[in-house]
Amino acid sequence: MEKREQLNAIRQYVTNSFNNERTGHDLYHLQRVSRMAMEIAREEDANLFRCEAIAWLHDVADHKLVEDEEAAIQALEEFLESLPLTRPDIEAIIKGINTISFSKSKVPTSLEGKIVQDADRLDAIGAIGIARAFTFGGARGKFMYHEQDNDNTIQHFYDKLLKLKSTLHTSTAKSLAEDRHQFMQQFLEKFHQEW
Ligand code: ADP
Ligand code: NI
């Protein structure tokens, strides 16, 4: 199977499991992360195939989305073997996926993993990031904002989203983050003003 066909099969694989996702990890999130990862990968001279594959697959074993992370990784590995992908490609992809999630707070060791982590984090900030945060918060029944209870979505900006800019690895992502970061700061300023 050619690389292009392998990527088509990978997209099909996630389409089946993410079609109905409503907490901000839907297919368009995967598409944006994939496009962004490719843009960064070209600038950073990374392996484009692995970057794209990791980007489409990066959320398949997220504990917020699946009950059994290990089973999800196992199923993915079997799927990749069935295509078949080469052993080094499979290992690079699985390793990338295992280190990307912020909640696991791991640092990917490969350039391709770092690039997809950057692309995923860029999708959590800026206008899209704001929309995703409130979508996620709403889906989990959180307060939009609360003066006594910290379990609210505005708090999530201070706990996580405003910190993401300084965790990026590549200079391409860092420069893309500036504008998005500023926009979130403006949003928070206005929000508190109107509140
Ligand atoms: P990752 O892909 O690194 O695991 P998450 O799944 O934690 O990232 O986050 C995915 C999206 O959901 C992000 O846009 C993030 O801001 C949002 N999100 C995650 N946790 C919360 C929360 N507690 N409140 C509001 N939004 C959240
Ligand atoms: Ni993601």
Image: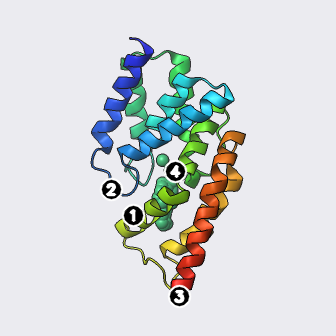
Q: Earlier in the sequence, mark 1 or mark 2?
A: 2
Of residues 28 and 148, which is closer to you in this image?
28
Contact between marks 2 and 4 (CB within 8 A): the answer is no
According to the image, what is the colour scheme of the structure? Answer: rainbow
Residue 37 locus on image (x, y percent): 55, 36
Ligand 2 neighbours mark 4 (CB distance < 8 Å):
yes
- Label 1 vs label 2: CA separation? 8 Å
- Label 4 vs label 1: CA separation? 13 Å
Q: Earlier in the sequence, mark 3 or mark 1?
A: 1
Ligand 1 neighbours mark 1 (CB distance < 8 Å):
yes
Residue behind mark 2: 22
Contact between marks 4 and 3 (CB within 8 A): the answer is no
Q: Amino acid at mark 4?
A: Asp
The residue carrying pointer 1 sits among few (fewer than 14), some (14 to 19) or many (20 or more) residues within 10 Å by Cα, namely some
Determine whether, in the image, residue 133 is placed left or right of residue 162.
left
Q: Amino acid at mark 3?
A: Glu
Q: Secondary structure at mark 2?
A: loop
Residue 195 locus on image (x, y percent): 51, 86
Q: Which mark is residue 147?
A: 3
Residue behind mark 1: 135
Q: Amino acid at mark 1?
A: Thr
Of circles 2 and 4, the one toward us is 4
- The quarter in which the N terminus is drawn is top left
Residue 179 locus on image (x, y percent): 63, 56
Q: Which mark is residue 158?
A: none
Residue at point 48% right, 80% down?
Answer: 145
Residue behind mark 4: 123
Q: Earlier in the sequence, mark 2 or mark 4?
A: 2
- Label 4 vs label 3: CA separation? 28 Å
Q: Is residue 132 above or below residue 175?
A: below
Contact between marks 1 and 2 (CB within 8 A): the answer is yes
